[in-house]
Image (spheres, helix red, strand yellow):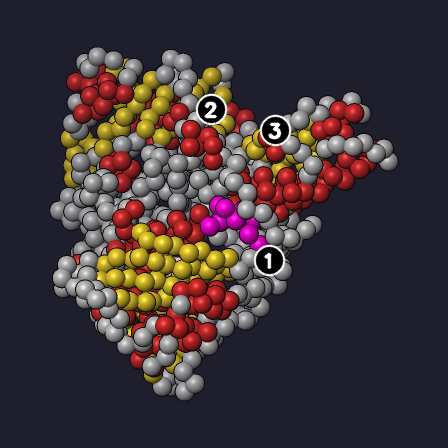
Amino acid sequence: MSNALFPNRPRVDAREKVLGTAKYGADFAIGDMLYAMQVPATVAKGQVTTLSIADAMRVPGVVRVLTATDFPPPPPAVPGASPPPPMIVTDITYRGQPVALVVAESIEAAIEGAEAIHPVYASVGFSSVVDAAGVANERAKDVVAGDANAKMANATMRHKAEYVSPAQHHNPMELLSTTAHWQGGVLTVYEGTQSTNLVKGVLMSNLRLDPEQVVVKSPQIGGGFGQKGSVQRQTTLIARAAMLLGRPVKMVVPRGQVFHNATFRPKSRHRIELGSDASGRISAIRYDVDHQASRSGQFGPDYHEHVPQMYGVADYLGTSADIRLDTQDPGYMRCPYPHPAAFAFESAVDELAFKLGEDPVEFRLKHKAEVDPLNGKPLSSTFLNDCIREGARRFGWDKRKSAPGSMRLPDGTQIGWGMGCGAYPVITHPSIATLRVRADGTSRFAVAGHEMGQGIRSMLEQVLIRDLAIDPAGLQLAIGDTSAAPQHTTAGSWGTASGAPVAAEAAAKLNLAMVDLMAGRRIVGNLHQQLAAIRRPYIEIEVSHVGPGQGSKELATLRAGGYAIAGPEYPAFTTFSYIAHFVEVHVEPRTRRVRVPRVVSVVDCGRVVSPRTAESQVRGGVVWGISAALREATDVDPRYGGWLNNDLADYYVAVNADIGEIDVGMIDKPDPLVNPLGVKGLGEVAMSGVSGAVANAIFHATGKRLREMPFRIEDLL
């Protein structure tokens, strides 16, 4: 299996996306379609006591209104796992929870019917913010290495502070949607989801269906970022409506309802203490964090998943807690834990370096990690220092004046240069793939994976056309389809690390099968031409791939629709992806507005399979990190429990005018142990450390340390 560099080929799906011909979940039109709209609860906690549907049924075009009586009771939750999303129920646990579903001949009638329903509630007291009375503090298990307390007591220099990351919402361009069709005893669902197998499993459980009765298809996703990695609230509702009415049903969820029903990044508070020894290295870390959580959700406060390992600090004490209150479940949002953790930790590292009189680059370079302090295993590849050195070279860091406030433009604009680093666990998932090459010039590769815009099809094509003599124009990539191949969730940056190796193994196995088939015959031409010459219509193989330490048990879990990830701790090693960001900010002298004219980001993600999409991933992560630092926050109305700025008019995100030049570099060295291609993850790590770099640059520009995102103009007045 070759470890050579991959070429920078165009995206395989670029043309259809530019032309608008790519089909997303809501684009599938089925004859005799009905349309649906949810009725959201207007209380934050309580119970529906009366729900009259009479006014809704009088709206022309309304076919039916589904309420709690139309659904079987939710199945019992599995201990230690997230419960399946409930159907419509009368108990209200958060504002915006659906209490009814209106189904109509047109979307306009469905909306009018939903607006005609006014339930009566018995409301009770609720807590919707982390510092409200009535919240529950639920401590999680500590993360411990060495003796941080003893080392901290002997530290020659200490730094201690609290950093706050706000609640944020994903807001992908493609809204949540479900289209369901019940025909011949089979339920087919089209939906933009990162986890077709998970959707299938929950539909089977909620609606009491057998595996052969459910097919879920997600050919394209218009942005997911974790929001579409879990099963959405509307999925079971629409599927049930299609089964009851015997007609296809579609619903596209309005953005305001997406804010209230989909998962989100929870508010988190990070209290960090660092100690240094006489040599000026970090000798101890104490890190306590809590975040907002729903009353019964399972999104734990796992913010210690990269901080102990990144700089090789042997003495670490990490504590954490869920602050349980009355909201919908929070969940994964791009770089879910390392983004807020890296903002806090990289800010703290910079603050300690400043106290020690150390240059931020040189201080970090002192801390090359070789061993995972949590388990004593070697780190398989650690090119973080390579990222730092290359980033500093590209950025021109040697021209930086060290004193805060010492760099200015002629008009008085303050210039700040800051840096921040990030890491993300390298995770893999078993994959089972089928590869068929036909004599007619076409090929089909069916495998787990979901296309969220990150370029997974382009990555798979890169591997297959490099290793197989086939026509790229005739290659079909069947992903996101439970009827084509067993599907795992595509998240956590394991798409390439799981898909690229199985594609390479499939190509190698098919080439060997062709050698056997040809039996010594030499025929000029590609595989299609060779098959045609011997009058063989096609050749097909199946292949599977597992991560280090995995085997038949994990493959069986995948076939059954289960979850079988491995990493970052493997039997013989631990492995992470790394990145270093260098940021320049300009702070205007009168308005105090912050601009980011340039960023340099250098990443270690193992072997880069698709350079075109990899660079795009990093740029997207940098844009989001800037947006998180300067723009994004979702605000709760504590009086009523709902999200106040639940639209794109008031939920501010970075726009083109906010983003300057982003220079991306790749170390592109294969990881020697994680898989034969040496591929690690990229999509998540791209965002890790950006916001910390922005905060550090603002401090360098102004001398003012900002510890709560987003950073507002008033913070610098």
**Which of the pair 315/678 is nearer the observer?**
678
Q: Residues within 10 Å of mark 1 (few under 14, many from 20)?
A: many
Q: Please give the label number shown on residue 24.
A: none
Across and down, in percent, residue 106 comes to 28, 17
Residue 474 shows which numbered tag? 3
Q: Which residues are magenta?
A: 607-615
**Secondary structure found at label 2:** strand
**Left or right, residue 277 beside residue 473:** left
Residue toward you, 250 or 671: 671
Q: Earlier in the sequence, mark 1 or mark 3?
A: 3
Badge 3 crowding class, 10 Å Cα cut-off, few under 14, some 14 to 19, many 20 or more, is some
Q: Indicate the amino acid at tag 1.
A: Pro
Snapshot quadrant of residue 191: top left
Q: Residues within 10 Å of mark 2 (few under 14, many from 20)?
A: many
> Which residue shows up at 33% across the image and 34% down it?
175
Q: Is residue 99 left or right of residue 386?
A: left
Q: Position of residue 635 (x, y in %)?
A: 20, 49
Mark pair 2, 1: CA separation: 41 Å
Residue type at mark 2? Thr
